[in-house]
C-alpha cells in the first residue's frame, strides 16, 4: 500500500459511529494527473491522424477553463476511443494534464485547444472577407488600383482568421478595412499595411 496526496470525499460515517469490517469511511482521490475527455468530429480526427505522420512530436494541448483563462499546464493526447458515435459522428479523445496545484476537479467543464502548425500557409483576417450565399470572397487591388472580386476557398478557420486553400497568393493585395464601401471594378486609393503588424493584433498567433 502506498501513500499519496489527494482530495478527501464526504465522510460516510461520523466519529463515534458503529462500523463493521469492510465499511467505507471515505474515499481519497489522487488528482495529481487529470484525464480530460472531449469529442472530436470525424474530419478533425482524420486530420489529426494524418498530421501524426508529418511530425515527430505530439502537439501541445491546452485547456481553457470556465473563466476563459488557460490552465497553466499543457497536456497531451493519451487515448482515443475505438469507435465513433453513430449518432453524433464524433469520437472521444482523452488528454492528460498534470494538476500540481489541485485546481482541476472531477466534473469541471472547459474547452480543449489542439495546436497545429501549418507551414507555408496563407492566412488572412476574417474581417477582410465577405460571404454571398455559400461562397466567400475578398477584394483584390491590382497594380492599376482597380478593385476586383475574388472567390476564395477556406481550408480551416480560427476565431479571427482563415487559412486559405486557394484563390489568392502571397503577392496579392487584399482590402482589409472598408470592404463594404467598395465595389467590383472601382478604382480606389489605398494604403499598404505591413502584414506582420496586422497578424500581430489577431487573437491567434501567425507569422
Image (cartoon, rainbow, N blue to C red):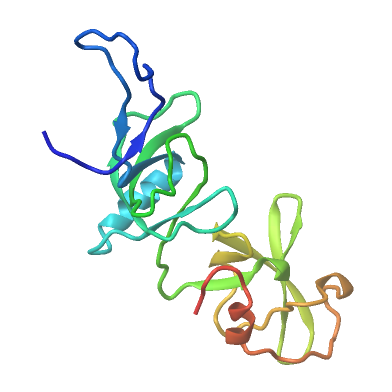
Quadrant for residue 125, please give it. bottom right
Given residues 159 and 74, the one toward you in this image is: 74
Quadrant of the rendered image containing residue 116: bottom left
Q: Nearer the viewer, residue 187 or 48?
A: 48
**Is 40 rendered above or below residue 139?**
above
Residue at the left extreme, as displayed: 1
Q: From this view, report whether residue 74 is shown above or below residue 179.
A: above
Image x and y of residue 24, in percent: 28, 17
Q: Is residue 17 left or right of residue 126?
A: left
Give the residue drawn at x 66%, y 83%. 173
Viewer-nearest residue: 171 or 207 = 207
- Residue 100 falls left or right of residue 65: left
Give percent across and percent down for residue 103: 44, 49
At 83% from the left and 78% from the top, the residue drawn is 185
| Horizontal side of residue 97 vs 111, given as left or right | left
Q: Residue 5 placed where, x, y %?
A: 27, 44
The residue depicted at 40 percent of the width and 73 percent of the height is: 119
Residue lying at the far right in this picture: please name it: 181
Q: Left or right: 43 with respect to 163? A: left
Q: Quadrant of residue 190?
A: bottom right
Q: How many marks?
A: 0
Residues 103 and 35: in front is 103
Residue at the spot x=81%, y=72% of the render? 179
Q: Is 177 situated above or below 3? A: below
Residue 171 at x, y = what percent? 58, 85
Q: Quadrant of the N terminus?
A: top left
Vertical comparison of 5 with 198: above or below: above
Amino acid at each position: 500500500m502506498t501513500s499519496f496526496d489527494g482530495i478527501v470525499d464526504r465522510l460516510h460515517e461520523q466519529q463515534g459511529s458503529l462500523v463493521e469490517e469492510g465499511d467505507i469511511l471515505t474515499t481519497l482521490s489522487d488528482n495529481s494527473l487529470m484525464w480530460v475527455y472531449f469529442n472530436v468530429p470525424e474530419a478533425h480526427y482524420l486530420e489529426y491522424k494524418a498530421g501524426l505522420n508529418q511530425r515527430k512530436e505530439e502537439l501541445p494541448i491546452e485547456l481553457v477553463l470556465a473563466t476563459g483563462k488557460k490552465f497553466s499546464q499543457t497536456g497531451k493526447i493519451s487515448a482515443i476511443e475505438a469507435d465513433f458515435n453513430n449518432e453524433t459522428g464524433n469520437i472521444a479523445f482523452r488528454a492528460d494534464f498534470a494538476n500540481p496545484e489541485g485546481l482541476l476537479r472531477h466534473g469541471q467543464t472547459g474547452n480543449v485547444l489542439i495546436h497545429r502548425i501549418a507551414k507555408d500557409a496563407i492566412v488572412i483576417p476574417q474581417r477582410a472577407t465577405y460571404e454571398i450565399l455559400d461562397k466567400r470572397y475578398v477584394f483584390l487591388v491590382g497594380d492599376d488600383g482597380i478593385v476586383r472580386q475574388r472567390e476564395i476557398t477556406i481550408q480551416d478557420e480560427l476565431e479571427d482568421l482563415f487559412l486559405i486553400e486557394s484563390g489568392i497568393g502571397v503577392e496579392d493585395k487584399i482590402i482589409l478595412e472598408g470592404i463594404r464601401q467598395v465595389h467590383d471594378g472601382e478604382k480606389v486609393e489605398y494604403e499598404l499595411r505591413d502584414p506582420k503588424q496586422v497578424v500581430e493584433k489577431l487573437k491567434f498567433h501567425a507569422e
